[in-house]
Image (tube, rainbow, N blue to C red):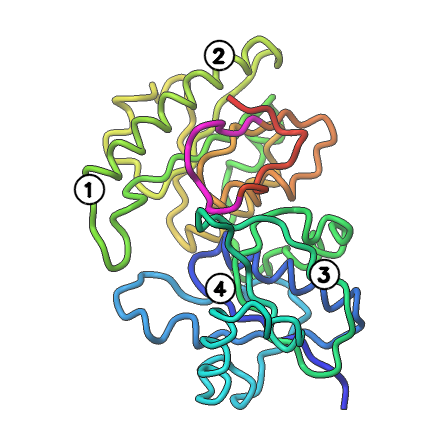
Amino acid sequence: MHKKIIVRIAEGLGNQLFMYANSLALSKKFNCELNIDNTSGYFKKKNQNRSYILDKFNISANLSDKNLRFDNYYLDIKRKYLKKTDFLRRNKRFIIEKLDNNKKTFFSDHSSGFFSNNIFVEGHFESERYFDNYKNIIKKEFIIKDQFLDANNYSKMLSDTNSVSIALRRNRFSEGYKKDNIKSEKFFLNTIDYINKSIELVKTKIPNPKFFIWSNDFTDMENYYDPSEFIFIKNVKNKILNDFDLFKYSKHFIVGPTSFHWWGAWLNSNKDSLCIRPLNLNVSNNKDLWPEAWLPV
């Protein structure tokens, strides 16, 4: 029987892309069929306003059979036990992202060893070090299918200018189970501070930059950025997909504290792209999140 890698997909688009990219790289390295569990990561989180969205992309993986999903009773019990028992992880039946003593994730090479069974993969794996060797393959698979995209004028504006992509996420900590509006607003204001410093840096490095802002909520945005100087990307239909697709037309990036924007910058094909990333904003649990070429601010 041909071995399979089954990856558990969960959360929003940016995290889904990390989870898939890591497992796609593993499947190529070990010549395994890649399957996706697109159900167990969502059905228990009743209040989470997110859903599986990778089916809108040109991915090659198939959905897993019901008996090979993480909500299978036997697999679920074994997975929870293995999470607490590092020794038993060595059987390579499960690849589960590791935590250090501070409960931070980090790059850990799990691509070595012999796999005699199907492999179940769970974790965020937020580092290009897991999949950078397969970047060309990933870029082809992370193209959105045409039927989910809408015509707009932004692509030409981005292509015809020295465009700089800025992403501002509102209500970062107010989605899902726990609402913390004060924490969200503080994080938003810290993000504004980081972006403003980055804008000044861009002006010293890029001639005639034109700034474009992506956001999940443009309420009061004009209080922070003048619409006559900044172009707001306001897609109406299929907002997440159209917003994501437009990243490929941008020349440069002030990478926001979101995995969504991380992928927009990483997939961009402009070889001369300037990518700035936050130095102090806690945007990920992974210490190896940022590519070395991106400038910290």
Disc 1, SS: helix
Residue nearer the viewer, 161 or 174:
174
Mark sitting on residue 25: 3
Mark 1–mark 3 distance (CA, rounded to whole Å) = 38 Å
Quick one: label 2 or label 3, which is nearer the N terminus? 3
According to the picture, the residue beneath numbered tag 2 turns out to be: 200
Disc 4, SS: loop
Q: Residues within 10 Å of mark 1 (few under 14, many from 20)?
A: some
Whether residue 189 is situated above or below residue 269 in the rendered picture: above
Mark 1–mark 2 distance (CA, rounded to whole Å) = 29 Å
Mark sitting on residue 100: none
Mark 1–mark 4 distance (CA, rounded to whole Å) = 27 Å
Counting from the top left corner in percent of width and height, residue 277 is at 53, 29
Q: Residues within 10 Å of mark 3 (few under 14, many from 20)?
A: many
Quick one: label 1 or label 3, which is nearer the N terminus? 3
Quick one: label 1 or label 2, which is nearer the N terminus? 1
